[in-house]
Amino acid sequence: MNNFIDEIKKRRTFGIISHPDAGKTTLTEKLLLYSGAIRLAGSVKARKSSKHATSDWMDIEKQRGISVTSSVLQFNYDGFCINILDTPGHEDFSEDTYRTLVACDSAVMVIDGSKGIELQTKKLFHVCAILNIPIFTFINKVDREIKNPFDLIEEIEQELGINCYPMNWPIGCGDNFKGIYQRDEEKIYTFLNKNHGQDIIDSYDGNYKEEIFKDILGEQLHKTLIEDIDLLNILDTPFDHDKILEGKITPVFFGSAITNFGVEIFLKNFLKYSSIPIKRESTIGYISPFEDYFSAFVFKIQANMNPKHRDRIAFMRICSGKFQKGMEVSHIQNNNKIKLSQPQQFFAQEKELIDEAYAGDIIGVFDPGIFSIGDTLTTSKTQFKFNGMPSFSPELFATIKPTNSMKRKQFLKGVTQIAQEGAIQVFREFNFRMEEVIIGVIGNLQFEVLEYRLKHEYNTDIKINKIPYSFIRWIEKSDVPVDNLNLTNDTKKAIDLKGRNILIFQNNWEIQWALDKNPSIILSDIGKFQD
């Protein structure tokens, strides 16, 4: 039992969030570098190296230099078992990020020190706040010109409404960047850049009051550092670990992901102060990770991670107990028993068969088409479901169909599987068949990814016709049959892949018309993958 508890306590499962180009994927690479999981870090844009980022495994990610799907990376470091969920930073793929964050126990927020809080960072922070998960902040790119550190701290507090506690402090920036002062250790780590940040760099430490640092930092920077630390000690929010775990204080770290500087210090502190696997809300109350039964929920489905094998993997977050290979579990939504065979843990696209895993871990199992996002699996004798995962309202719509009618079967299979992954939402018009379907997405880039994947994974070319609609609403309740609803001529009646009735509108006026003319109707802008 002690070993069981210890195994769970050493798990750390977190997501990394940021605005595009803040350095999120680069930071992920350097965390892997320090763990020994990789020996050479790959640049996302790969200007100085032929390598690509480890977490970017799709061909389109390598071509565009962006992350378009969440990636799972598990590795060990300093006695901890770490599960990183590297999420897309691009706003067009934010729904995948939202769902992935549900599987996390904490989040790392990466901020570009020259730009401060950006729109996508703000959106993702609020998702974390709703989930009540701890947030650790890494202010990146201090080796370039950045905003005044005090201004950055004030911006985080005012824009995001969370108190900050700077764990370290930068000494200069840009060409004048000399290192960081680590507050809890009362030490200065001096900056040394070499080999474009592909190797682990050296650092030197010592008490900042020592005379030698006047020579290393220069008299003016040394004087500024002392003034900054004195001011911090007067103005600063007191360090409070409990409030960090409650998501009320964010520890702030300064560093440079591209050069590795400050990354290992950040990693050690994150592991020290971040949350062990948290309890999860269900239909019978909160489920503790230390329960003696296994339970998990599906938060992601990914098809064709290995195009040669046409595989389909269901990613599960283990919420309680211990998983063992071949164990029989209850699949709650399908009301049957299944064996979880060939369980795998991931390092981006690479997979490794495992025999066991614990609460906090992310595992993947082969999906023959029986799993859906939000499904609950458990060995508990008491049947329950974890809370359903949200399906957000898309903002852009298009009709699509195969250019070759002989490829209709591949077209339908591809569209359906990609929709089951949560990458797009698929609808068919009321009383119509599936020769042509309506696609709903968050951003235009999703149309490009859909077209690319259908062509390269399902050998199907498609014709996309964007349509001038902006809103959908799920019909939660109506005393009137859908065919008899009083709607504007432009309102589309449709059905999603789960058979639920929806309405698609061009503007808010049409939504209000539907509500005014149909008093019994109840509409929702958020659906559930599983209710």
Image (spheres, grey):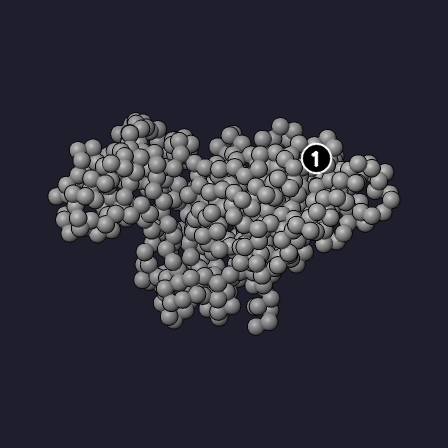
**Camera sees residue 78:** yes
**Residue 179 figure quarter:** top right
Q: Which residue corresponds to the image point at 71% horizontal and 39% vertical from the top-left?
A: 199
Vertical comparison of 384 with 271: above or below: below
How far across and how far down the image is residue 13, in percent? Answer: 54, 54
Residue 72 can be seen in this image: no
Which of the pair 392/70 is nearer the observer? 392
Q: Quadrant of the C terminus?
A: bottom left
| Extreme residue toward the left, this view | 484
**Local crowd size for mark 1, using a 10 Å CA cut-off: few (<14), some (14–19), many (≥20):** some
Residue at label 1?
173
Please provide percent x and percent y for residue 418. 37, 41
Question: Looking at the image, which residue is at 82% across and 37% down?
Answer: 219
Q: Is residue 210 left or right of residue 298?
A: right
Disc 1 element: loop
In the rendered view, would you say 370 is above or below 170? Answer: below
The x, y position of residue 359, in whole percent, is 51, 61
Residue sticking out furthest to the right: 211
Q: Quadrant of the N terminus?
A: bottom right
Type of residue at label 1? Cys
